[in-house]
Amino acid sequence: MKNPSQQNYISQVSIDCVIFGYHERQLKVLIPKINFKGDFWALPSGFVYQEEDIDQAAERILRDRTGIQDIYLEQFRVFGKASRTNKPFLDELIAFNFDKLSVKNEAQQEYDWFTKRFISIGYYALVDINKVVPQKTDLDESIEWYSIHELPRMIMDHSDIVDEALKTLQSHLDEKINAFNLLPETFTMKEVQEVYEAICEKTFVRTNFQKMILELNVLERLEKKFTGAANKAPYLYRFKK
């Protein structure tokens, strides 16, 4: 694998992706653990090639981490504080892994490249968690789904990036009507309500919620979902194409 400084990347620009999934009434985030000694977790991230559009770079990073195409993707914020640098994290990583990562002459160029100020472009993605096969890179020990309420301690400002992504998703629900991207192709109204409640972190009155969703006129009603239980079978819906 080529060192980043030797590739045709735009210097001091990175992309950080918050990949949201939904499972068992919980909003989840896909997070890799870095494959070195110490507890280091980071958002799925990457760099932008000189000849590459920013959105194309984000799509590439997401495709490489999820194994799926056609992901719902939104750019939501640029993180660019003057003090934003990898240096504290990288120095801590080196201290835990000095036998492998001591900064010798041949590594100094990479250290200098990584420890400059970096501007990060934040994206969030919404995926059907059942379609995702999480993909590790050479730098990952693992890549797992974590509940939005039980995230590991992440490097740099990645926890803040998740917080901002969630706030943006919450503000987008009415305007972009995008929560359906977290569900399978067909779903019940109850499942829609549970997704909204997981994102908004509050409960809704069932009748009021159903009326609100149906008035959006974005759903197509299908046959009923028969489960064999004694209760009344609910209708299935799908998002209008």
Image (cartoon, rainbow, N blue to C red):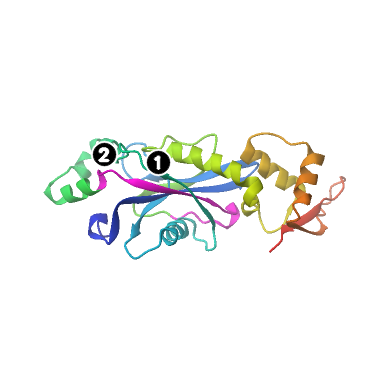
Q: Residue at x 40, y 41 (%)?
A: 41
**Residue indicated by mark 2:** 87
> In the drawing, does residue 143 fall left or right of residue 72?
left
Q: Residues within 10 Å of mark 1 (few under 14, many from 20)?
A: many
Tell me residue 186's x, y (percent). 72, 57
Residue 225, quarter of the rendered image: bottom right
Q: What span is colored magenta in the figure? A: 114-135
Residue 34 drawn at (x, y percent): 36, 45
Look at the numbered disc 2 and give the secondary structure of its residue: helix
Residue 115 locus on image (x, y percent): 25, 43
Magenta stretch containing residue 191, yes or no? no
When asked about the image quadrant of residue 128, the answer is bottom right
- Residue position marked by numbered label 1 in the rendering: 41
Question: Which of disc 1 and disc 2 is earlier in sequence?
Answer: 1
**Can residue 193 be spotted in the picture?**
yes
Q: Quadrant of the N terminus?
A: bottom left
What amino acid type is highlighted by mark number 2?
Lys
Q: Secondary structure at mark 1?
A: loop
